[in-house]
Image (tube, rainbow, N blue to C red):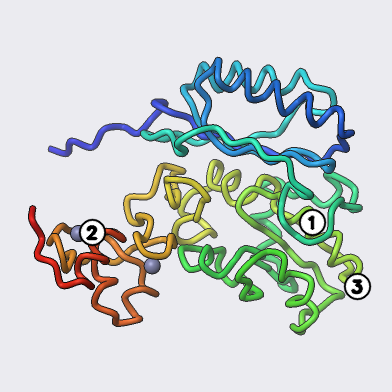
Amino acid sequence: MTMQSKPDEEFQIVSFYRFVSFSKTELSKIHKELIKEGATNNIVGLILLSKEGINATLSGKKENINNYLQFIEKQKGLEDLFYKRSPSTIPAFKKLRIKTKKEIITFGKPGKSASFGFHDLEPEEWEAMLNEEKVTILDIRNDYEIELGQFKKAKNLGLKEFNEFSKKLQSVELPKEQKTLLYCTGGIRCEKAITEMEKQGFKEIYQLKGGIIHYLKIFSNKSFEGECFVFDHRVAVDQSLNPSQKYALCPHCGQAAGRKIKCAHCKKHTKVCKHCINKKIEHLMTCSKNCAYHFRMGHQCRK
Ligand SMILES: [Zn+2]
Ligand SMILES: [Zn+2]
């Protein structure tokens, strides 16, 4: 008998973004109201605001999340948002952070010129186009995200950070005349990438609407292989969009940790990422920064 509890509905994780131009006054007003309304509804998560729009990942109980979304959609320019939902047994953040920044996704170039929605493919259309003969499938996420899973046959640019995109794209030979199919986690990076790719002469660019998260809702265990890295406490989501059972957060570097080890200090079973393991440094074979410190100092574990 398995005791696995159904990881449903306890908490919901919702993510969305919208490119819309806010004035300075509008930004400070919405910032204050989002904090206030977030506290009322016990919402945790991260919201990035900028003159170019909003980008958010939120977590809370279903009813609270719905109230909060309803409130957000009453704001000018934020009507009828397209959001991605997934279930979680944990609230994927500790608190609610709202930041006003230059961009809602760091790219190095505020704003976006490609017309919204023009290039979007629904998961069904995407799935059909993946199998066409002359297409380039391009994963524009960072390499540590791609390590956990990707679409079959996808190419990538080996990015450490998204703001390397324009330069890296220039340095690789990709066919510009044929269809290029872009994807990322939730779609926002594609929006910025498309603008840049058009500038660099790519003729026919499409993006997966709502990213991998939206795709997995419709097709699990199909063309996307492995798990999808996410930037919160879940580390990754599996094919059913449930929090990863396979990965934990590496205690030493914050990347996805999939290798089981026994802490060299306290002997607890834990997970460390393969990069830290490959460094072959003994104090990284520990369950926490604290244990790493004591191990380095040669202390005995007092537990
Ligand atoms: Zn690590
Ligand atoms: Zn330990």
The residue positioned 26% from the left and 66% from the top of the image is 292
> In this view of the protein, which residue sits in the foreground, 59 or 222?
59
Of label 1 and label 2, which has the lower sequence position? 1
* Front of the two marks 2 and 3: 2
Please say if 270 is above or below 62: below
The residue positioned 46% from the left and 63% from the top of the image is 148
Please say if 202 is above or below 48: below
Find disc 1 in the rendering and name its residue: 192
Quarter of the figure that contains the N terminus: top left
Mark 2 burial class by Cα count in 10 Å: few <14, some 14-19, many 20+: some
Mark 2 residue type: Thr
> In this view of the protein, which residue sits in the foreground, 288 or 233?
288
Mark 1 residue type: Lys
Find disc 3 in the rendering and name its residue: 201
Give residue 119's position: percent from left, percent from top: 82, 52
> In this view of the protein, which residue sits in the foreground, 238 or 110?
110
Q: Is residue 208 left or right of residue 287?
A: right
Report the image quarter containing ligand 1. Answer: bottom left
Find disc 2 in the rendering and name its residue: 270
Mark 1 burial class by Cα count in 10 Å: few <14, some 14-19, many 20+: many
Mark 3 burial class by Cα count in 10 Å: few <14, some 14-19, many 20+: few
Q: In whole angstroms, how far apart are the C-alphas of marks 1 and 2? A: 38 Å
Mark 3 residue type: Gly
